[in-house]
Amino acid sequence: FTEEIGLTASGQPANVAPALKSIPANMNSIKGQLNAAANAPVGAFPIVVNGKAKHQNKDFTVNAPPANLVLTK
């Protein structure tokens, strides 16, 4: 894909906010983070990052395999 790819995350528990930006056009990666508040629950949570983009005037949505977010106190 050469167009911008919008990213979202799902599966994070309450009080954990994803800080994701879109992957700019003609780029293939970015760094993002999940910000956990002090009162976020402890445990392991499967997080899925979703990418959405257009290619040749068609919409594509792809989900990355789940990654475990482990929160401890």
Image: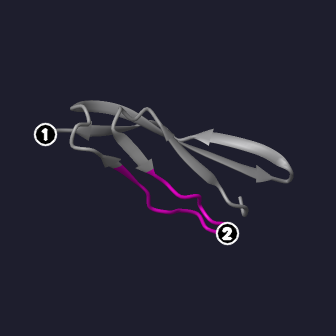
In the picture, the quarter occupied by the N terminus is bottom right
* Chosen colour scheme: one colour
What secondary structure is the magenta-colored segment mainly? loop
What's the amino acid at mark 1?
Lys
Q: Where is residue 10 in the image (x, y as percent from the top left)?
A: 48, 36
Q: Who's the residue at 35% across and 32% down the image?
A: 14
Lateral position of residue 24 relative to residue 15, left or right: right
**15 or 2: nearer the eye?**
15
Q: Position of residue 37 (x, y in %)?
A: 27, 44
Judged from the image, the secondary structure of the residue bearing numbered disc 1 is loop
Q: Who's the residue at 61% across and 68% down the image?
A: 27
Lateral position of residue 52 relative to residue 63, left or right: right
Q: Give the range drawn in magenta.
A: 19-34
Q: Position of residue 53 (x, y in %)?
A: 71, 50
Q: Quadrant of residue 38?
A: top left
> Which is nearer the N-term, disc 1 or disc 2?
2
Q: Who's the residue at 77% across and 51% down the image?
A: 54
Judged from the image, the secondary structure of the residue bearing numbered disc 2 is loop
Disc 1: which residue: 73
For residue 69, above or below residue 2: above
Q: Who's the residue at 63% across and 41% down the image?
A: 62
Give the mark toward the camera: 1 or 2: 1
For residue 52, above or below residue 30: above
33 magenta-colored:
yes
Disc 2: which residue: 26
2 magenta-colored:
no
What's the amino acid at mark 2?
Asn
- Return the residue found at the far left: 73
